Image (cartoon, coloured by chain):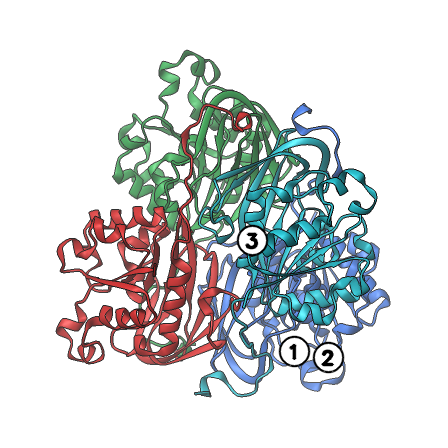
Chain colours: A cyan, B blue, C red, D green
Amino acid sequence: MSIRVTVFNEYLHETFDEKVRGIYPDGIHGTIAAFLKEADFSVTTATQNMEEHGLTEEVLASTDVLIWWAHLIHDKVSDEVVERVYERVMEGMGLIVLHSGHASKIFRKLMGTHTERLRWRESDDKEILYVVNPSHDIVNGLADHIVIPHEETYGEYFDIPEPEEQIFISWYEGGEVFRSGCTWRRGKGKIFYFKPGHESYPIYHMKEIQKIICNAVLWAAPKHNMTLTEGHTPIPMAEKK
Amino acid sequence: MSIRVTVFNEYLHETFDEKVRGIYPDGIHGTIAAFLKEADFSVTTATQNMEEHGLTEEVLASTDVLIWWAHLIHDKVSDEVVERVYERVMEGMGLIVLHSGHASKIFRKLMGTHTERLRWRESDDKEILYVVNPSHDIVNGLADHIVIPHEETYGEYFDIPEPEEQIFISWYEGGEVFRSGCTWRRGKGKIFYFKPGHESYPIYHMKEIQKIICNAVLWAAPKHNMTLTEGHTPIPMAEKK
Amino acid sequence: MSIRVTVFNEYLHETFDEKVRGIYPDGIHGTIAAFLKEADFSVTTATQNMEEHGLTEEVLASTDVLIWWAHLIHDKVSDEVVERVYERVMEGMGLIVLHSGHASKIFRKLMGTHTERLRWRESDDKEILYVVNPSHDIVNGLADHIVIPHEETYGEYFDIPEPEEQIFISWYEGGEVFRSGCTWRRGKGKIFYFKPGHESYPIYHMKEIQKIICNAVLWAAPKHNMTLTEGHTPIPMAEKK
Amino acid sequence: MSIRVTVFNEYLHETFDEKVRGIYPDGIHGTIAAFLKEADFSVTTATQNMEEHGLTEEVLASTDVLIWWAHLIHDKVSDEVVERVYERVMEGMGLIVLHSGHASKIFRKLMGTHTERLRWRESDDKEILYVVNPSHDIVNGLADHIVIPHEETYGEYFDIPEPEEQIFISWYEGGEVFRSGCTWRRGKGKIFYFKPGHESYPIYHMKEIQKIICNAVLWAAPKHNMTLTEGHTPIPMAEKK
């Protein structure tokens, strides 16, 4: 069975900003869903204005990897849905947080820090992503660096826990660096934060970026589901067969 | 100026359990405060039944390291106080979480996982703690292992993020192992989880355990307070002097 | 094409010790090769008394994952072969170091520490391995702990660099703990150290242990081979297209 | 007693290059020794042309932290001296590797990778170092970024094991990024690699750079010396008192 991906998009910029709609006529989620389908994943989309943001119990129960893009109204995501997504990550659902999703409630909850804190500028900077973990599954098939002609600039200090694996570090024309590809595990879930993807640039149309997101889906998808014993276990383990 | 430590204790077992009161007549916080004072730290105590659990803005603003012991009524800790402690950790306050404090709201919030999940048994097991990071400040002056004659047993899987530094791993007579000393950084704060200290055993009277907690206070105390730029910074960094 | 595994075994205990020969009539390498073949890997074996220990340029060039078991004569492994294996790891070959292989020249060279240093006892102890990274590929299909009825005891402090991923921690009846499953990356190669497998016990005949080694082969095998630029690169990266 | 630092410098550029001698008339080691003395450390210097490169048994036995600057003739450092330095790191001596020291025998041996591999250019680039671990002892008293007006450029991929702590990441005008401040522990020793310090620029005269090196000495110096049991320990740990 193919991996089941749900792409969540706030889907707001595309509704009021002509430029963004020009780049993503079907929404950012539409573009991401399209290249994932081409890569033979089983894909669903969800947007903020849907009932329960489209992230019902049923949807999440049948999601292997959730992709999260949002920017303007993180605060409007219901706490109940955040809690639900959180529990699914604990159970093994993969989570890929894109770009401004760094400030989302779910990412903050999983990291335990003020992940909304970083520097930023909009000035059409060139961004170069450098691979710093060349054997990682997420960089499969890539060159050792990727050039994005124009992108919003993010800069350090980015308030995240030390990444378990640092995959990419970005350079920006105007003088910033950023830890732009990072992984962590929480509970049984795997998390990948990936920085590129400002709404005003056609970044999710780039083949290399699509390749990275496809790789990340493969990496983050649960491969098994281990039953973990917990709580009061009165029989000493040494006495068990 | 000496490091300012606040010892928070739920202070409940000692009020209704004769055995515990026998071991800790001044409360667990009283015992911990006493050996910290002897080590020349500046010490305050706080308990759950105090106004705002004794963790007011004023108290926290003048705390360098907070020690947290609690067990029975984690849920009764006010969310406002948890939020306040959290923000102080982000700003640099050290946090030492002891024993059953693993299930506290504050530890769960900082870790982003179900840290309340682990195995446990009460059966007077011997525990041996092994040092696995021999050059760490927290093990200064210790032998390479510590024997606790009787202790409550905790066992893996302990649902924590991969520790940034693994300091101790424990062995229990009945067949369990446990990651019993772990560090993480969150924001500008340093966190140490240390497993020993069940209320029914005189563990905080042991010299080695006291030494570890004193070392951890020295390690966790903020040494400086870096100002971090964040948010919209329109001038490219490269143009600054 | 299936993953190509080379199993290196010192192959000495089996030649002079009746008990060991009884357990491993075809050598430890023979038993490991057999279950790997059953799992559809493409398998070759190599032993110390072969020309160049069976690890010629040709053999290594066509090896995806090398498994290493040795004990008595680490010093007799030629430095030239060690250098050759090292360069293949740098290029992406996976390496699985088993049991007493912790003291091998190649493992010491890759770790940069005295990995031969640890405690050990032979006394038929029960060993229990606990999973501490439940979503890792290496624990696919396992229970959350594994019992080995009798095994040689290893104990901390084990002089290794902090593992990048801690997969298993072991408990021993006599009072020791051990970091028994650990991963690191070096260059483009992935390394897994796995403790079980004393020659006097039929440990490589256990289904769970076989499963772990098969999983580790899948994990350690190179998935791609990124070309990394190095050295003098006079053209500024920002000027490249 | 103050911390005893030995500054090793190859001391070659300064002997034949007018420009370098103009910047470092007493050698790079002389400049580093001078600001360390001012900071009240007890300082010795050693250079490659001295007997045993000035790193005799006696010198190393009384060294708490060794600083290593070298560039042109890494291969000429005697293997015996490298071995001696290595054993002292295992025993707890701190090691600070500066700039082109990344390609030294001792750093390669401790890391287990081809640390000589990275990109480089000489073109007077501006370098900006960003702090990514704001509570670390090594960044005590600094701003959250440091500007070096002109420096040799290093770029990723830098072939190092994943740092245990990432302290600085550097930006270069021409488009490169570099993991410019990294820590690891090996045996009982602490290691800090710090990138700045090309011989053609007055970088070790900069107050911030001096502050970082002083902080690193304080961090890397051994605080205690734990006796670690190893080898055959026939008595089960559980039976010991």
Judge left or right: residue C24 versus residue D151.
left
Q: Is the C-beta separation of discs 2 and 1 under 8 Å?
A: yes
Q: Which mark is residue A214?
A: 3
Judge left or right: residue A151 versus residue D58.
right
Mark 2 or mark 1, which has the lower sequence index? 2
Q: Which mark is residue B199?
A: 1
Residue A142 position within the rendered picture, expressed as x and y whole percent measured from the top left: 49, 44
Judge left or right: residue C5 versus residue B162.
left
Residue C209 position within the rendered picture, expressed as x and y whole percent measured from the top left: 37, 74
Q: Residue at x 47, y 80 (%)?
A: B175
Say which quarter of the image contains residue C221.
bottom left
Which type of secondary structure does the marked residue at label 3 adopt? Answer: helix
Total numbered badges shown on the rendered structure? 3
B28 and C85: which is toward the camera? C85
Q: Residue at x 79, y 45 (%)?
A: A13
B75 and C18: which is toward the camera? C18
Which type of secondary structure does the marked residue at label 1 adopt? Answer: loop
**What's under tag 1, amino acid-wise?**
Glu
**What's under tag 2, amino acid-wise?**
Glu
Chain at tag 2: B
Q: Residue at x 79, y 52 (%)?
A: B61
